[in-house]
Image: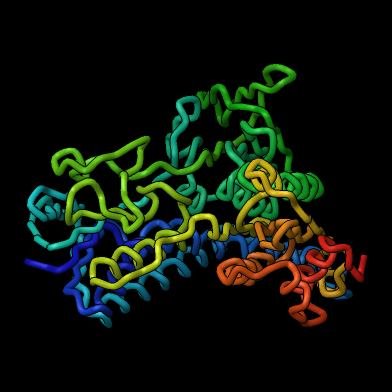
Amino acid sequence: MNYDVIIIGSGPGGYVAAIRASQLGLKTAIVERESLGGICLNWGCIPTKALLKSAQVFEYINHAAEYGIKTAEAEADFAAVIKRSRGVAEGMSKGVQFLMKKNKIDVVMGTGKVKPGNKVEVKGADGSTSELTAKNIILATGGRSKELPSVKQDGKKIIGYRQAMVLPEMPKSMVIVGSGAIGVEFAYFYATMGTKVTVVEFMENIVPVEDEDVSKQLLRSFKKVGIEVMTSSSVESVDTTGAGCKVQVKTAAGMQTIECDIVLSAAGVVANLENIGLEETGIKTEKGKVVVDEFYNTSVKGYYAIGDIVGGQALAHVASAEGIICVEKIAGQSPEPLDYNNIPGCTYCSPEIASVGYTEKAAKAAGYELKIGKFPFSASGKASAAGAKDGFIKMIYDAKYGELLGAHMIGANVTELIAEIVVARKLETTGHEMLKAVHPHPTMSEAIMEATADAYGEVIHL
């Protein structure tokens, strides 16, 4: 079979690229070895949000009295929570199947491997092989849970995020290694459901890529709900010979042993580069990533790479944007290269975290003179009415020209607020314009205006 475009991998990079290619009149095929939608739809973004929603509902019921509502004692049906999450994921995957049919994209099930001469070899689950050819081949093979040498996953007692989504029963205790988005989301979920959770983080702060003020606030919020956090600490070994796990943790004060039922390794993701034909085709890699230019051309003409296997943030929305840019360039259009400094990051623990642009530390290191404003949700009428006063919005501006350098939010539903900042930065909005854009009252979003007012010494409600 001969195509204009073949894409290997149907995650949010691959399937979005396939749809855009079809829209642009290119004959397109997509190769997938497991389920349409990739990790994001099946084992990542979507099912985890379903789990977190169940935890949030459980939390609401347990605090119903604070809202003047009397309820009987709530009980979490862990198996039913897991089942709901899987159902949501399956529904989304079927949605992608529909989109493939609607856009007349050929779906080839099997493991894809690039070969020289613009060819893709596909090995089916039954061992059969077929060969496809295309003028353009896009690699979108994604990533998987990173394994630490000291925390070897066995899938039972030491698990990755996939197993964490489908545990047969709720553990009484859990140690989570790593406090990035995956680690803190599962920490919130399991702690809310009733598991005793300890988070071990190698860096000085949890959620270490975030602004330090956000990290400190999340630490306070986690401690308040009984999540134990150990920073500047590392897991040296895990003994699984007994009924549970004995975790040896190295801290500034010395070695500690923590006993638990399950250890969740959440130390990030690693790119799926093995056995996809990179060496045979001559495609260059560096530091575990495929080397690409601003339009995702690899070192070999006619071969492209997007998503978690290239440099840049390993996020679903980044992969989608890269896929669209890559395909538009293939189709002869003139897309704008992606601005990796205007990518929003969202973490869905409670309170939620959302950020974009420079942190305060990074802005200072870049040589900017800053105007910084913060507005706590404790001063927000909407947050008080919702019973969600934890957190704040922090706005960072260039003092000289008023450029909006970054925004950092922690609080209820802040992941829904960050897009305003992304659009504002894209439009090169200044602090003055943000301040004078009237925000609706009462909303969580008016804290953006108030934090900006604080930066310029004009805050009203503080």
- Does any portion of residue 171 appear in the rendered image? no
* Left or right position of 220 against 349: right
Residue at 64 percent of width and 67 percent of height: 421
* Left or right position of 162 against 134: right
Residue at 88 percent of width and 67 percent of height: 459
Residue at 36 percent of width and 64 percent of height: 37
Query: Residue 70, image x and y in percent?
Result: 85, 73
Residue 71 appears in which quarter of the rendering? bottom right
* Left or right position of 97 against 390: left
Query: Residue 66, image x and y in percent?
Result: 88, 68
385, above or below 9, in the image? below
252, above or below 374, in the image? above
**Total number of numbered discs in the rendering:** 0
Residue at 25 percent of width and 55 percent of height: 304
In this figure, which colouring scheme has been used for the structure? rainbow
Query: Residue 106, image x and y in percent?
Result: 18, 71
The outermost residue toward the top is 254
Which quadrant does the N terminus fall into?
Answer: bottom left
Residue 331 appears in which quarter of the rendering? bottom left
- The residue lying toward the viewer, choosing from 139 and 368, is 368
